[in-house]
Amino acid sequence: MTSPAHGNPHGSDRSLSAAVHDLVTAIEPISGYHRVALRAALGRILAEPLRTAVSVPAHDNSAVDGYALRHADAGHVPLQRVGTAAAGHPYTGTVGAGECVRIMTGAVVPAGADAVVMQERVSRDGDAITPEPWPPAGNNIRRAGEDLQAGDCILEAGRRLTAADLGVIASTGRAELNVKRPLRVAFFSTGDELRGVGEPLGPGEIHDSNRYSLYGMLTQLGVEVLDLGTIRDDPETLAGALRQGARDADAIVTSGGVSVGDTDHLPSLLGEHGELLFRSIAMKPGRPVTVGRFDSAWYFGLPGNPVSVMTTFTQLITPALRRLAGEAQRPARRMRVTTRSPLGKTPGRQDFQRGRLVEGTDGELEVVSVGHQGSGVLRSMSEADCFIVLPAERGPVEAGEIVEVEPFAAPLIA
Ligand code: AMP
Ligand code: MG
């Protein structure tokens, strides 16, 4: 229970979806961008809509190895082979009545021809060619512009560029493009009990694991990270770390110190020296999340519990940082599957339990709980490959019921 003296930050919990919406609306994307070579654009965010000045393919060309012919010659067989068209070596003449041209995949369809027959569908006697059966008009011809039309917008601004996108851009001949500058994110852990990896533990101390999971998630999001270390639960020191983060980065992400305990200083620091947007969300794990601004930076204060850190980062901080980085929003994919495990749940908060997708006997996907769902059991995240997303108002779930799952996102290339 929270005492009146502390206020009750949980009293007016907002839903996660409302928090994401408000945050994404409030955040203005960074404006900086730079020009990079095509390969360096992989995983980066396109800073402008990309148009193509050329059509792809540029010419009608053959989809197969065979013979280019005039469809109107139907029945007038055999055709006389008068030349060859190979990829990169067009036939320069015109195919006349009763004629055909040997053609290879990717070769320009010669003037006069309007269909191509596969070589497996002809009988041959020297240069006398008889298609069997006669092909329909347009057969096996890839049309100019069927992939991209000159003038088309091929990719929208805000797109995170994929391997396929790089290929599409290359097909238009473009060698360089403008991408958003990387977002800079400072992060630190808070807590007097924390020790770094490689350090021995004193009584009551634990190793700082959040700084490692956060490092991983931030890096996989394609941002530049600035690790400010482990900060003690001291308001002055914390304020100093916030100031440094705000000076050197676009956003600050912290873990711990945002709840209602006596050593949870960050919400009041933000209230006094920054701007506090909200400090509680009706989600589990991860109810205390403090969001606001500190100097010129966005501030995201995550709870200390390691599973809460990863859950709130995925559900709230990821869309916020994507928006700040200039990336178009793309809601996480969710799907409905049968749960094999019963799931404990009390009505009140939206729950993100950890699960693993498995193949059921009928080949359909099912989900199993990874077991212990405590917000301190980080192993549950490591063993899971999806969140089982249970609505706030729901009670316990029985095995065999349909639930919504959100597979963990594949890491991006930084
Ligand atoms: P707090 O939100 O600061 O009250 O922390 C909640 C719980 O998470 C406590 O048990 C902390 O010891 C633990 N915790 C906080 N920060 C970290 C961290 N960086 N790594 C591992 N556990 C942490
Ligand atoms: Mg703490």
Image (spheres, helix red, strand yellow):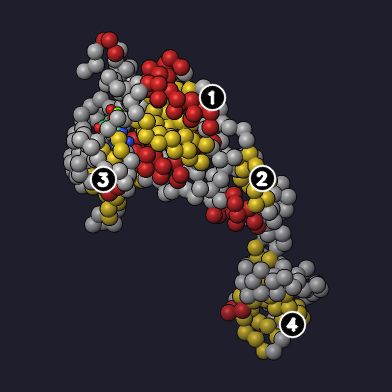
In the displayed structure image, the side of residue 345 where residue 82 appears, left or right: right
Q: Which mark is residue 296?
A: 1
Q: Residue furthest top?
A: 5
Q: Residue at x 37, y 34 (%)?
A: 230
Query: Where does the image place residue 277, in percent across and percent down from the top left?
Result: 43, 20
From this viewpoint, is residue 279 visible? no
Which element carries disc 2, helix, strand or loop?
strand
* Ligand 1 quadrant in view: top left
Q: Does the residue labelled 3 lie within 8 Å of ligand 1?
A: no
Q: Name the residue under label 2.
A: 35
**Category of crowding for the residue at label 4, using alpha-carbon neighbours closer than 10 angstroms: few (below 14), some (14–19), many (at least 20):** some
Q: Which three-letter amino acid code belongs to the residue tagged 2?
A: Arg
Mark seen at residue 80: 4
Residue at the location (59% across, 51% down)?
A: 40
Q: Earlier in the sequence, mark 4 or mark 1?
A: 4
Inspect the image, locate mark 1, and give the three-letter code of the amino acid beneath it.
Answer: Ser
Closer to the N terminus: mark 2 or mark 4? 2
Q: Which residue is drawn at 79% across and 74% down?
A: 96
Q: Give the mark nearer the N terminus: 4 vs 3.
A: 4
Which sits in the foreground, 340 or 113? 340
Which one is in front, 43 or 142? 43
Q: Name the residue under label 3.
A: 379
Q: Which of marks 3 and 1 is nearer the N terminus?
A: 1
